[in-house]
Amino acid sequence: MPKHAEGESTVSAPSQIPFRSARYAVVTNLYHNTSPSAVTVGYSAETDEVAEVYAYYQHDVPNSVSDLDLAGQIIESFGVVPDPADRAADHRVANYVDRGNRPLARGDVIAIDHRYYALTETGFTPIARPRTATSGQPLPAGTTRL
């Protein structure tokens, strides 16, 4: 795999992401990194914890759609402040924003059918399941625990 500037392997081609077996729905989970430095230095398995902020099923996903394709769709939907037309078109985006969540950013984590990817400056890095922030721990502004 290509190397990220900080030495992390980065997913940059569909051939690097596994295809899913045939299924009707894909489970998607979004996590915010609770480390204040994550947005500048990225995700660190040694020090960072995440808070799950949103989850949904995406139904009728064709077998030919890779995790990389789905991750791109997730960033397009949840990685920007949506305009009113986007919010009206996708109830998931509206719900995510209405809960007080900020857009996804570098250092955050997405899970697609329980396969985890940290967002990097240039794409996504496959990671092991991240550590979850303990309940009751104060969370950064723009992060509303699910």
Image (tube, rainbow, N blue to C red):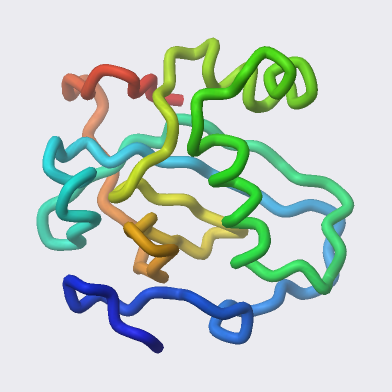
Residue 86, placed above or below residue 98 = below
Q: Position of residue 52 (x, y in %)?
A: 41, 36
Q: Position of residue 132 (x, y in %)?
A: 28, 43
Please give the name of the residue rendered at 28% of the width and 75% of the height, measured from the top-left corner: 4
Q: Position of residue 6 (x, y in %)?
A: 17, 71
Q: Position of residue 84 (x, y in %)?
A: 67, 13
Q: Quadrant of residue 139?
A: top left
Q: Quadrant of residue 64?
A: bottom right
- Give the number of marks: 0
Residue 50, placed above or below residue 109 = above
Asked whether, in this view, residue 124 is left or right of residue 42, the answer is: right
Asked whether, in this view, residue 114 is left or right of residue 137, the answer is: right
Viewer-proximal residue, 27 or 34? 34
Residue 66, placed above or below residue 73 = below
Viewer-proximal residue, 134 or 38? 38
The N terminus lies in which quarter of the figure? bottom left
